[in-house]
Image (cartoon, rainbow, N blue to C red):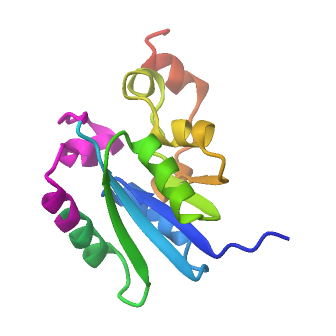
Amino acid sequence: MVYLKKILVTTDLSEFSLAALEYASFVSKIYILYVNDPGASVFVTHGHDATQKDQHPRTEREAQEALEEFVMQNVKPDVNLTRVVRTGVPADEIRKFAEEEGVDMIVLATHGRTGLKHILMGSVAEKTVRLSSIPVLTVKPRPLRENNLKSEDVEKELHLR
């Protein structure tokens, strides 16, 4: 039997990443990790990616403050989180931190991007699943769970129709 004692929850400071916290509240030690990606660029899109407009490289202090504000606004005060900020490529830093701390599972939310957006921007969740030797639980946020993706949507996104 596997006993989960330490869980790493990742966040990009968007409301989508809160879905990952729902799955970690039963564990005694929870880390919340924000990776400040120096290669990130500012972009604004329509639909459920609009929260990404704030994703830009920050100073270490700005990243710490942004994570603290995110936790204060979105997490109940009785949830004991160890807040961690790293700088680097998100999938690499997630894996490294998880291994260093000996976490039992990584929980991260997906944005549900498909088609061209997925190809151009990649997926931190996908890369983390591929690279990590630690089990990874990917969670779709509630709005994405309620909107079932259809093959026609993917074809339209890739301009196949």
Q: Is residue 127 visible?
A: yes
Q: Is residue 49 left or right of residue 119?
A: left
Say how many tags the image has.
0
Q: Is residue 27 shown above or below 62?
A: below
Q: Position of residue 150 (x, y in %)?
A: 58, 31
- Verify whether residue 49 appears in magenta: yes
Point out residue 108 in the picture as x, y percentages from the top left corner: 51, 55
Left or right: 148 with respect to 45? right
Query: Hey, which residue is sitting farthest top in the picture?
Result: 160
Extreme residue in the front direction: 100
When asked about the image quadrant of residue 99, the answer is bottom right
Q: Residue at 48% of width from left, 63% of height from top?
A: 9
Q: Position of residue 14 (x, y in %)?
A: 32, 56
The residue sitting at 44% across, 22% down in the picture is 119
Q: Residue furthest bottom?
A: 78
**For this rendering, which residue is in front, 35 or 142?**
35
Query: Magenta segment: does it hold 156?
Result: no
Query: What residue is at 59 percent from the left and 64 percent from the top?
Result: 102
Q: Residue at x 15, y 50 (%)?
A: 58
Residue 38 in the image: state x and y as whole percent: 23, 39
Residue 23 in sight from this viewpoint: no
In the rendered image, the quadrant that contains the N terminus is bottom right
- Tell me if residue 26 comes above or below residue 39 in the rendering: below
Q: Which residues are magenta?
A: 39-65
Q: In the image, is residue 34 above or below residue 147? A: below
